[in-house]
Amino acid sequence: MKAATFPLGLVRALSVFGLSLLNLLIASSAVAQAVDSNARAEEIVQGKCFICHGIDGESSSPVFPRLAGQHSAYMARQLADYRSGKRKSTTMQPMVEDLSTEDFAALGRYFESRQPVKHELGDPELAQVGRFIFMRGNPFSGVAACASCHGERGYGTPQLPRIAGQHAQYTENQLKAFNKRERTNDNAVMHAIASKLSELELKAVSAYLSGMN
């Protein structure tokens, strides 16, 4: 008895259909995972993060960082450092100790997707001094330009934080922590840079960044 044969065109059509169906299933699975991930992030934000950072990353106090638009990979790494104790914080460590690496990634994607809000400068004249330091540094004291790493718009990279639009007070506090070596989980270059900033330069750069968007 001869085996059944099928026209070549039909075989090709069935193959294309099979691949299309497989791709559709993969895409559907990816969408479902993304929905689950976002739902988990919303659950965590509403249960923990919103108290200090707000639902959309617009923090309630200048001592807490604005998170809207922050790079997801950078944020996930910072959360992991809080959990491990590599980055010290008596507030953040208890908040993240029961969260997973997947939770950190979900939170990173959640806040990265939030639209940053533009804020008015509190002291435009001080900010102009900060703009010079940000764009050109201080060649007389060896301070490097912030823009050389964080970009001219302060958007950073997945490895370096977005600093545009950050609270001036929070930026000041972090620069001082780098200078005192109280913050050691990030790029050690920041220790050298922060140690060379004068009080005026530190406050001026922080003021300038707060008005960027």
Image: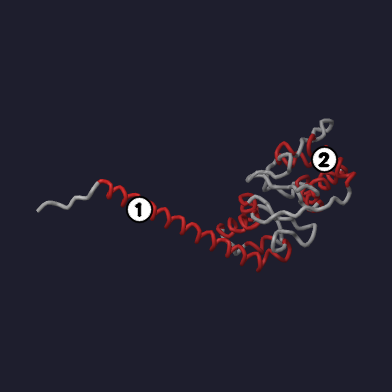
Q: How has the structure been colored for display?
A: secondary structure
Q: Amino acid at mark 2?
A: Arg
Judge by depth and name the residue closer to the eye, 202 or 72. Answer: 72
Q: Residue 21, how many percent across, how many down?
A: 38, 55
Residue 27 higher or lower than 198, as above or below:
below
Q: Nearer the viewer, residue 162 or 124?
A: 124
Residue matched to label 1? 17
Camera-near label (2 vs 1) is 1
- Distance from the alpha carbon under mark 2 to that under mark 1: 58 Å
**Mark closest to the chain's N terminus, 2 or 1:** 1
Indicate left or right for 101 with 15 as reference: right
Task: In the displayed orientation, state which residue is furthest to the left.
Answer: 1
Residue 57 rendering spot, x and y as whole percentages = 71, 59
The amino acid marked with disc number 1 is Phe
User: How many neighbours does mark 2 have within 10 angstroms: few (below 14), some (14-19), or many (20 or more)?
Assistant: many
Q: Which mark is residue 131?
A: 2
Question: In which image quadrant can residue 193 be found?
Answer: top right
